[in-house]
Amino acid sequence: MISHNYKMSTSKKILAKLESLESKIDELLNTVSKLENASTTRRPEASAPSPNYPPVVTKVDRVILTKYKTYCLLTGNTFDIRNDFKALGGKWDGDSKGWKIKMTNIDDFATFQKELSNKCVTLKIKEGIESTATIPKPSLNFEELGDCMIDDSSDSE
């Protein structure tokens, strides 16, 4: 038979352990609740830049702006500012390896050029010459080529 004192001490130990577990569970639930609240609500200081620090501006290097009559072409290291060109309706041209923007999409070219130079360490500006010449398609005149002889003896058995 188990003594009465042994049962009491075991019960107290179990009760103490349960109370300890309960307090740890409460701590975990509070932590989870704080994390859920932080993820669903935006902190205003996170969305707005601090007035004490200037915004960080990353400038790109070696951009070439070539101005044509109907469009401008931007080549070079343009990856980090590509969204600016997309906002103006610019399209990537794989053959030219650059962004083509129609001149009709740019309200003021001088302002565009100034804003672009603020984002670039080096900006080279060139005037392009649009080619209006078309390459003529060759015409085949079979009379000039002469007769064509087909030797069908190779197909014989």
Image (cartoon, helix red, strand yellow):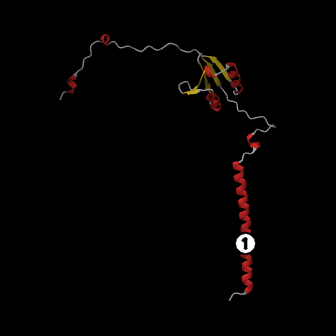
Q: Position of residue 96 (x, y in %)?
A: 55, 24
Q: Residue furthest top?
A: 144
Q: Is residue 32 left or right of residue 129?
A: right
Q: Residue at x 73, y 76 (%)?
A: 13
Q: Residue furthest right?
A: 52
- The residue that disc 1 covers is 17
Q: Quadrant of residue 11?
A: bottom right
Please, is residue 47 above or below residue 126 in the view? below
Q: Is residue 138 left or right of residue 68?
A: left
- Residue 60 vs residue 103, the one in the foreground: 103
How many discs appear?
1
Q: Is residue 10 left or right of residue 94?
A: right
Q: Residue furthest left?
A: 157
Q: Is residue 154 left or right of residue 8?
A: left
Q: Quadrant of residue 34?
A: bottom right
- Residue 154 vs residue 14, the one in the foreground: 14
Q: Position of residue 131 (x, y in %)?
A: 53, 14
- State which quarter of the image contains the C terminus: top left
- Residue 16 vs residue 129, the one in the foreground: 16
Q: Quadrant of residue 121?
A: top right
Q: Position of residue 105 (x, y in %)?
A: 62, 22
Q: Is residue 77 visible?
A: no
Please, is residue 144 above or below residue 25 in the view? above
Q: Residue at x 74, y 43 (%)?
A: 46
Q: Position of residue 107 (x, y in %)?
A: 66, 21
Amino acid type at image mark 1: Lys
Q: Residue at x 20, y 23 (%)?
A: 153
